[in-house]
Each structure stands twice: as structure tokens, then as C-alpha cells.
Image (tube, helix red, strand yellow):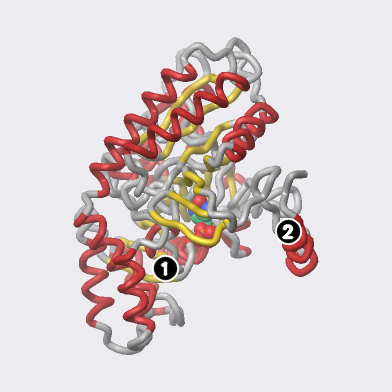
Amino acid sequence: SELPETLRETIRRRDEVLGPGYTLIYREPVEFVSGHGAHLVDRDGNDYLDAYNNVPCVGHAHPHVAQAVSRQVATVNTNTRYVQEALVAYAERLLATFPEGLSRLSLACSGSEANDLAVRVAKFHTGGTGIIVTRWAYHGITSEVASFSPTLGTGSPLGPNVRVIDPPDPRLAAPGVDLAEHMRGQVRGAIDDLERHGFRLAALVTDGAYSSDGIFTDPVGYLPGVVDEVRAAGGVYIADEVQAGFARLGETMWGFSRHGVLPDIVTMGKPMGNGMPISGVVFRPEVSDEFGRSVRYFNTFGGSSIPVAAGAAVLDVFEEENVRQRVLENGTALRKGLEEITGDSAHVAEVRGSGLYVGVEIVGDRQTSEPDRARAEDVINDLRDRRVLISGTGKAANVLKIRPPLAFTAADVTRFLETFAEVAKVRL
Ligand code: PMP
């Protein structure tokens, strides 16, 4: 290994204190000491292009967010047991980005906590316990949420009340069956099987843009029929916007909006505070108010002043820098460039995505579409060696996951494509 001795020593100490659960990304792991925009800097001052991290959405160490948080840390931090005008104003601002009907907000600290609360409210409201998710979904880490996250490994079994359906990949439908019909049939089958085993449906939980299933943002249009089936069975539809939310897909602030459906519950997290732990659950009041009256839910840090200051500062930047428009333009250029570079490659089955959420599916041979995980790993590590950061996802980890901070500029797109072309020449 070419790793500096000091870094190797830190990794050894790290393994000692954190244990085997904490895996590192890349064959040559890397440590960063600062960041700005979509760039990260290592101990030797080398600049890396971050095309992977969705948390610092308005950019690493954005000065406006940094100032807002510093000011709040140096002033006061109170919680939801006190009146906080800033929290009320933030909730009003955030809810204004949702369609009418989605008008209540609860705050928490992580996407997992948001999904945990969403499902808890769904169970309370419907009286059911059944949950439907996509086959390779990831929704989080609490024991409840882990029980409906199929990708956590053999040590983390699904709950008996959980059923999986295909992600919206048109290639999974039988010949002659369109995607909408296929998805509706999948959900109907899951509901029937739950009922046969004595479980009434509580919720369908799906990503606003399917992430760990392998990056499926499109096509849209199948979801209204799926949600009709869910509601007919007495369940609610929970949109997990932890990945898709906050304009990641460019066209809209929220992924579900592209599908023309109104969820009953929406969860969000990661980019919400640009790195401060803040997550949210948005409800239709008909679904959540009885829970609010009957169950004591107090989240010490959720809705406290410091993360709320970060959340409000992120919304400021969205307005000041017209972030959504930038995502749309740079995302389109990124996908177009990737299509040009890989158009003739026998090893690229598809470039797909929307906005700054792009997947490149790597296969052994385009004719057979057999996943080629090893080749995808080579591409990811070659890019890292050229100081460009991405990762992989999907059921066989063979889909390159390109999901940069939304601060990605036109110059960043150019650097990304130039570097990708060098790697593609060798690997693709
Ligand atoms: N839902 C989705 C779609 C996610 O991608 C994640 C995190 N990767 C979560 C939920 C869980 O969020 P957190 O890690 O903040 O608990």
C-alpha cells in the first residue's frame, strides 16, 4: 500500500476502538481536514472533487450556514418545550415548499428517527402493522426501521410484518406488462400475502428516488396506481425523501412531486442542515393529530435551536443561490457527458438519473446485462486515485452512484467528466 505511515497508524487505532462494523470506503482510504463547495482537502493539501456526499448540500463549510450555527451556539439552545419563534418560522417556511394538505411538521435528528416516527404514526392511525418496501431498500438503523431495511445483511432479518416489492425497474416487468401494471400487481400481491398471514397494512414506504435499489428516478407515473392500492387496503403512503428531497432531482423540491401523488407522510434528513443533525417528518393532520394528542413525543435535540438555525440557513442559501436551477442545469450536463463517454462501451448498460442523482450501471457485457461488481469497484477506486469521489450501489453494488453536493458547479462537471473519460478508456 502507498498509504502514508501516519494514516496507516490512524486506521490501525481506528479498528481497535471502533471494531469491525466500521468499514472504510476505497482501497486507499483517505482523511480530509477541510472542505469548501464540492471540494475536500487532505492533510497534504490535495484537492478532491466530492461527487458523492449529499449531506453538505449547499457546499462543504458553507459560510452562511457556518455563521448561523456559530451565532446560535454562542447565544442559546432551547427545545420544543419552550416557545421558539425561530422554530415556528422555520416550520412555516419548510411547509410552504409542500403541496396543500401536508401541513404538520415534527423534527428529529436523523433519517432513521424520522422513518421510525413515520411508521409509528402510520401504525397508530391505521391500526395495521404491515409494511411494504422495495426489495433492496435502506431506511435506517433503529430496530423498527432495520426490520424493514432489506439491505442490512444476513444478521438483520426482515420483520414478519414486512413484504418487499420490486423497485421500479421496467426490465423486471414481464414482457408486454407496463411498469405501472407491474408495480400495482407487486403491491397487490404484497397486501394479499400480508393479509393471509394476519397482518393488516399500515404503510408503503418508498424512496422519492430509489437509492440502494440502484438509482431509479424514472420513469414517473406508476405511483398513483400503487398508492390507490395501498389506501384501498387501509394503509398510508410514506415518501422517504432522505435522498431525493431538497431539490436533489432538480425539477422539484421533493421527489414525490414528480409523480403527481400526495403522500400521507414525508420523511427527510441528510441535507436538511448541511451537516447539523436535523431531520423532519411532514404529515397530513388527519393522519398525525390523534397520535399527537394521545402519545407523549418529546425529542430533546429534535427542533432545538442550533439544528433549526442550520436548517433555516440552508433554506436561505436555496433562495439566494437558486440552487434548484443550478442542479437542473449541471445535472443535465453531467448525464449528457456520461452518456457520450460511455455510449460505445460494452460494459455500461445504462446511464440514468435526474438532477444531481446519477447512476451508471456496469455490466460484464451489454448483451447479457450481468452485473460486474469488480469492474464497478475498479472504476470507483481509479477515480479516487485521480481525486474524484463516488461510490457504488444497487443489489450487486455494480451501479456507480454519482450524487455530489448540490454546490457542484459547471467547472466541477467538466473536471468530473474529464477524469471519468480517462478511467473509462481503461476500464469501460
Ligand atoms: N432513508 C434513506 C433513503 C437513506 O438513504 C438513509 C441514509 N442513508 C436513511 C433513511 C437513514 O438516515 P440516517 O442515516 O440519517 O439515519
Q: Amino acid at mark 2?
A: Gly
**Residue 81 higher or lower than 99, as above or below:** below
The answer to which image quadrant residue 100 occupies is bottom left
Residue 161 versus residue 391 in the image, above or below? below
Asked whether the viewer can see residue 235, the reply is no
* Residue wearing tag 2: 21
Q: Does ligand 1 reach within 8 Å of label 2's beta carbon?
A: no
- What number is the disc on residue 278? 1
Q: Residue at x 46, y 46 (%)?
A: 206
- In the image, 253: left or right of 157? left
Local SS, label 2: loop
Q: Dot 2 surroundings within 10 Å: few (below 14), some, or many (20 or more)?
A: few
Task: Measure how far apart labels 1 and 2 are at the Cα level.
Answer: 24 Å
- Rendered location of residue 156, percent (x, y): 71, 54
Task: Check disc 1 and give the amino acid type.
Answer: Ile
Image quadrant of residue 136?
Answer: top right
**Is 18 displayed left or right of 382 in the figure?**
right
Instruction: State the residue in front, 109 or 36.
Output: 36
The N terminus lies in quadrant: top right
Q: Nearer the viewer, residue 163 or 414?
A: 414
